[in-house]
Amino acid sequence: MPSMAVMVMAAMAQSTYVLSKSSLFRSSFKCFPQISARFSSSTATAASTLSSANMLRHHKGRTTVASLVERGGVQIARDDVVRDEPTNNIPDTIFTKLGMQLHRRNQHPIGILKNAIYDYFDTNYENKFVKFDDLCPIVSVKENFDDVLVPPEHVSRSYNDTYYVDPQTVLRCHTSAHQAEILSRGYKNFLVTGDVYRRDSIDSTHYPVFHQMEGVRVFSPEDWKSSGKDGTAYAAEDLKKCLEGLARHLFGAVEMRWIDTYFPFTDPSFELEIYFKEKWLEVLGCGVTEQEILKRSGNPDNVAWAFGLGLERLAMVLFDIPDIRLFWSNDERFTSQFAEGQLGIKFKAFSKYPPCYKDMSFWINESFTENNLCEVIRGIAGDLVEEVTLIDNFTNKKGMTSHCYRIAYRSMERSLTDDEINDLQWNVREQVQSKLNVVLR
Ligand code: DAH
């Protein structure tokens, strides 16, 4: 029987989910309001209340957190992001990740993979694709959702799934948030790489911050006229050819298959899977851009394709990286294993430290969600928590529901002491009770 965590993970998998030269959007990074999925077919309702998200707010003053993050020329003030208001659900653990931009580190697996994809596009499209990789991750709800036609009731808009700065402003949950604006500015071929943020459960493949790359290509009627196909068929064919080539560039001669799916921003929509190490692996989501997006961006006569891919998911496979937390490690035993331009390197685990499991049971209430629980646990244990799994779930005759979660604590860098783990667990129990209003059993 798959555990609940696995099932939730499957349903909400972080799928698919530079212009360094130009400063076009850079100003948006510094001055906060320029403020300028789970998007595939699985749209089960996971509405959560504002109040439950709010319960997760960090108690100010408990930990000392820098008031400004600045990395790679990016400055974001804590007060712009973490606010003690019911409509803000951003913890300090997330604030400290803003601006880390792993995708801009050329010796980091995420940067190496980004550059390998750039190489593919540069070689095959004569440097036509303009690259954006430092756009501000703080975007408006309009950009993140409305502009790419995400319906008002879509699960990804909930406070349970997305980090809200305020009711109009979010941490982008996908790089698609930039599509419409860049199209409006007249770009016809572009790639957008960036850090994206999603509230989620905890296991070796999910982390609340990860990296995506988006690609968009626009065609004009002259492009498809002579082909005898209509614009949509022409774009879909070009899209598939382009992405099959990309998959071969990254993975070699692998078997591939196309799966029909749904995204709000494309029609038709597809997922590309490759057969790798005896498993079908979802590589990306893509499709022919909804005409409404092109119309609104001033390209009514054009047709376009778009794709989005998760860099961690692919990097874990390509570099043999077993746990997504490793990408954030500064341990030299991790960082020293990778080199600029080298996609083929396989990560060698430096001895695996033992896990320690702690179970906790409680009666849940109506606003309880697993994402909220995981946020509390991460707030205390940070990257020392490896997995949170629902191992028991029952409802008694009075209609009260009990959940038992198993928390796996494991550092990737050292052995944890019993005292340390007991301390963490004690804090977790206390905060789960006080912040989530559940009753421990
Ligand atoms: N934004 C989607 C996600 O995060 C990925 C995606 C799918 C992007 C299809 C696209 C697209 O541009 O056409 O799950």
Image (spheres, helix red, strand yellow):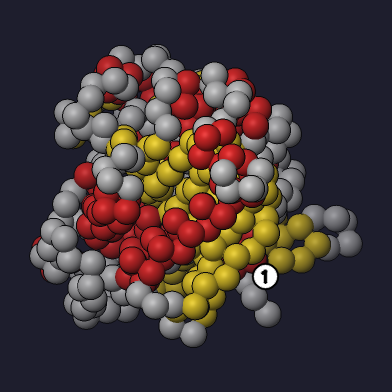
Above or below — where is 172 with respect to 214? above
Residue drawn 53% across the image and 68% down it: 273
Q: Nearer the viewer, residue 37 or 254?
A: 254
Kind of residue at badge 1: Asp
**How many residues crowd mark 1 within 10 Å: few (<14), some (14–19), many (20+)?**
few
Q: Give the secondary structure at mark 1.
A: strand
- Residue annotated with mark 1: 392
Question: Residue 382 at x, y = what percent?
Answer: 35, 52
Q: Going 39% across and 61% down the picture, which residue do you hit?
A: 246
Residue 36's quadrant in the figure? top left
The N terminus: image quadrant: bottom right
The residue at the point 31 percent across, 39 percent down is 128
In the rendered image of this protein, does residue 250 appear above or below residue 72?
Answer: below
- What percent of the width, then of the height, locates residue 282? 52, 65
Of 130 and 109, the residue lying toward us? 130
Q: Quadrant of the C terminus?
A: bottom right
Left or right: residue 19 versus residue 53 is left
Residue furthest out toward the bottom: 278
In the rendered image, is residue 433 in sight?
Answer: no
Q: Give the image quarter of residue 154.
A: top right
Q: Residue 298 at x, y = what percent?
A: 54, 19
Horizontal arrangement in the rendering, residue 330 relative to residue 272 (left or right): left
